[in-house]
Amino acid sequence: IIVGLTSKPEKGKANLELIKKLAKYFKVSSSQIRIVSGLKSRRKIVEIIER
């Protein structure tokens, strides 16, 4: 999935924006999404935890 973000990659702001957008798209809570790898990279692996 390619996600466009507007936040700058400073202090985790872009990662938080990504989590919020994915949560909205998949209709889950943002606490159910976790960045598994790529915290400081443009390419990331995320996990969606089912509850």
Image: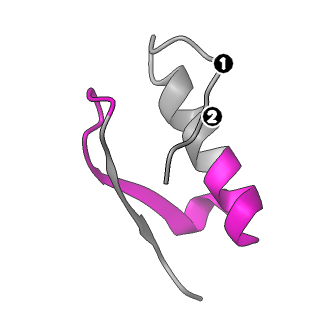
Sequence-wise first label, 1 or 2: 1
* Disc 2 packing (10 Å; few <14; some 14–19; many ≥20): some
Do the residues bearing badges 1 and 2 touch, measured as CB atoms within 8 Å? Answer: yes
- Residue 40 placed where, x, y %? 27, 26
Element carrying mark 1: loop
Q: Is residue 2 above or below residue 24?
A: above
Which residue was labeled with disc 2?
17
* Disc 1 packing (10 Å; few <14; some 14–19; many ≥20): few
Specify the quadrant of the image occupied by residue 26: bottom right
Element carrying mark 2: helix
Specify the quadrant of the image occupied by residue 11: top left
Q: Is residue 33 above or below residue 2?
A: below
Which residues, given as a range, are shown in magenta? 21-42
Q: CA distance from mark 1 to mark 2?
A: 8 Å
Which residue was labeled with disc 1?
6
Instruction: Name the quarter where the C terminus is drawn.
Output: bottom right
Q: Is residue 28 visible?
A: no
Q: Is residue 11 left or right of residue 3?
A: left
- Residue 31 placed where, x, y %? 59, 61
Magenta run includes residue 38: yes
Residue drawn at x 53%, y 25% is 14
Which residue, as the protein is rendered here, is positioned at the far front? 2
What type is the residue that disc 1 sits on? Answer: Thr
